[in-house]
Amino acid sequence: MSSFKLSTSLGRVSAAVAAFLAPAIAFAQETAPAAAEAVAAAPVPDKGDTTWMLVSSALVLLMTVPGLALFYGGLVRTKNMLSVLMQVLMIASVAMVVWVVYGYSMAFTAGGSLNSFVGGFSKLFLAGVDTTTVVETFSKGVVIPELAFVIFQMTFAAITPGLIVGAFAERVKFSAVILFTILWLTFIYFPIAHMVWFWGGPSLYADPSGLIFGFGAIDFAGGTVVHINAGIAGLVGCLMIGKRTGFGKDMMAPHSMTLTMVGASLLWVGWFGFNAGSNLEANGYAALAMINTFVAAAAAVISWSVVETFTRGKASILGAVSGAVAGLVVITPAAGFVGPMGAIVMGLVVSPICYFFVSTVKNKFGYDDTADVFGVHCIGGILGALLTGVFVNPALGGAGIVDYSTADFAAGYAGTAAQVWSQFKGVIVTLLWSGIGSAILYKIVDVIVGLRVTVEAEREGLDLSSHGEAAYHS
C-alpha cells in the first residue's frame, strides 16, 4: 500500500473515530466547568484560623494540666498535694475520652424533641467527622476543620469538672471523683453546653437553638457553661460531703503559695486560648477578647489587693492570685463582646464582691469550700454574665451582639434592660440545672461507692491513703 493510500485510510479512520466520540467530547466540555465550579465551591478551611484554634486548644490544656492542678495543689496541705494533681489529671483524661465517644454529639448536634435541652447521638463516636468536614465560624463563609472545633471544645469539657474538686479537696474518694465526673459531664455539662452554645450545629446559624441561647443570652467563652456550672456544683458538693476533719480547729493553711502562684500564672496564660480562641477565628474580635483578658485580670488583682489592704492591713499573694482568677472568670462571658474600658470596670468590681463571699459569707455560714470555688467561680461567673448584658452596649464601648443571619455583631443588640434580663434567665437556668442535678448525682455516687474517705485516711492524707506515695520526702 502506498503512503498516500495509507494516509487516506488513516484519515478516514480518524474521521470516523472523531465522529463517534463527538457526543462524549461535547458532554465533557459542557460538564467540565460545572465540575470545576463544584470543586471551587467546596469549603476550604482557613489555615491561619485553623492554626489559631489548634494553638488555643493547647493553651486551654495548659490551664488544666499543669495550671489548675498546681493552683489547687498549692492551696491544700502537704499530705494532699498529689491527690489533687491526680484528680485534676484523671478528670481531664476521662473527660477527653467521654467527649469524643458521645459528649460532642450531645452538645453540638440537634436533639429532636429535646433539642432545647440536649443534643442527639448522630455523631456518636465522632461518626461523620473526618478531615474533610468543616465548621463555619462567626464570619459567614469562613470555615475551620470540624476536628479543630471538636478538640477546642473538648478542652473545655476537660477543665470544667476539674474546677469542682477544689471545693471538697482533701476528703473525697478518688473513685467517687471519677464516677461523679462521668455522670456530671453526661447529665449537667453536655446539656448546659448545648443550651448555651448550640446554634444549629456546625453551621452555627441554623434553627433550632438551645434553650439559653434562645433566650438571647450570650456567653462568649463559658461564664455559664464553665464557671457558674462548676461553681454551684462545687458548693453543693462541699455541703453534702461535709467539712474536713478538724476544720476550724486544725491548721489548714495552704502548704505552698509558690506553687499556687505558678498555677495561677499558667491559668492566666492559658486563658488567652480559652477566651480569644472562643472567637473561632484569628481576627479583630480575637484581639479584643485577648486584651480584655489582660486588663480585666490586672484590674481585679489591683482591686483585691486594695480591699485586703483596707480590711486586713496587708495585701497577700493569695489575695492577688484570687483576684486574678476572679478577673479572668468575670470577663469570660464578655470577652469578645465588651470594650477594654468595660473589661477594666468588670475587673475592678468583681474582686470586692468575691472577697466578701470568701471572707464574710463563707465564715458566716461555715461551709468548707477548700479552694473557694463557689466564692470565685460561681459568684464571679454570675456577675460576669449580668455585666456582659450592660457593657456589650455599643454606647459603652461594647461590640454589640452578633446577628447570626448576617454575621453583623452590632445588629443583634436589643438594649441594656432586655439583654440583662436574658442574661439573668440564663444564670437561673444554669444554677437550677447544675445545683439540683449535681445534688442528685452526688447522692447516686454516695450510694454506689461512697463520697468520703474514712477519718483515718483523711488524717493520714490522701496522697498515702489513696495513692501510696508522697509529694515530698524529708
Image (cartoon, rainbow, N blue to C red):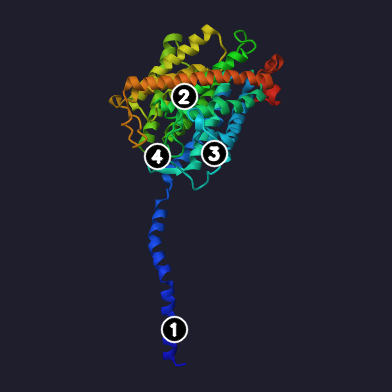
Q: Nearer the viewer, mark 1 or mark 4?
A: 1
Residue at image point 53% right, 44% down: 128
The residue wearing badge 1 is: 10
How far is the residue under mark 1 from the one under mark 4?
63 Å
From the viewer's perspective, tell me whether residue 54 is left or right of residue 473: left
Where is residue 50 drawn, in percent x and y?
A: 45, 43
Q: Decide which of tag 2 and tag 1 comes sooner along the chain.
A: 1
- Residue 361 visible within the image: yes
The amino acid beneath tag 3 is Ser
Where is residue 399 drawn, in percent x and y?
A: 33, 30
Give the SS element for disc 1: helix
Q: Nearer the viewer, residue 196 or 309?
A: 196
Q: Nearer the viewer, mark 4 or mark 3?
A: 3
Q: Residue furthest left?
A: 395
The answer to the question of whether label 4 and label 2 lie on touching residues, with beta carbons closer than 8 A, is no
Q: Is residue 396 above or below residue 253?
A: below
The amino acid beneath tag 1 is Leu
The amino acid beneath tag 4 is Ala
The residue wearing badge 2 is: 224
Give the SS element for disc 3: loop
- Assign the C terminus to one quadrant of the image: top right
The residue wearing badge 4 is: 282
Q: Decide which of tag 1 and tag 3 comes sooner along the chain.
A: 1
The residue wearing badge 3 is: 122
How far is the residue under mark 1 from the one under mark 3?
61 Å
The amino acid beneath tag 2 is Thr
Q: Decide which of tag 4 and tag 2 comes sooner along the chain.
A: 2
How far is the residue under mark 4 from the one under mark 3?
30 Å
How far is the residue under mark 4 from the one under mark 2?
24 Å
Where is residue 164 drawn, in percent x and y?
A: 56, 22
Q: Nearer the viewer, mark 4 or mark 2?
A: 2
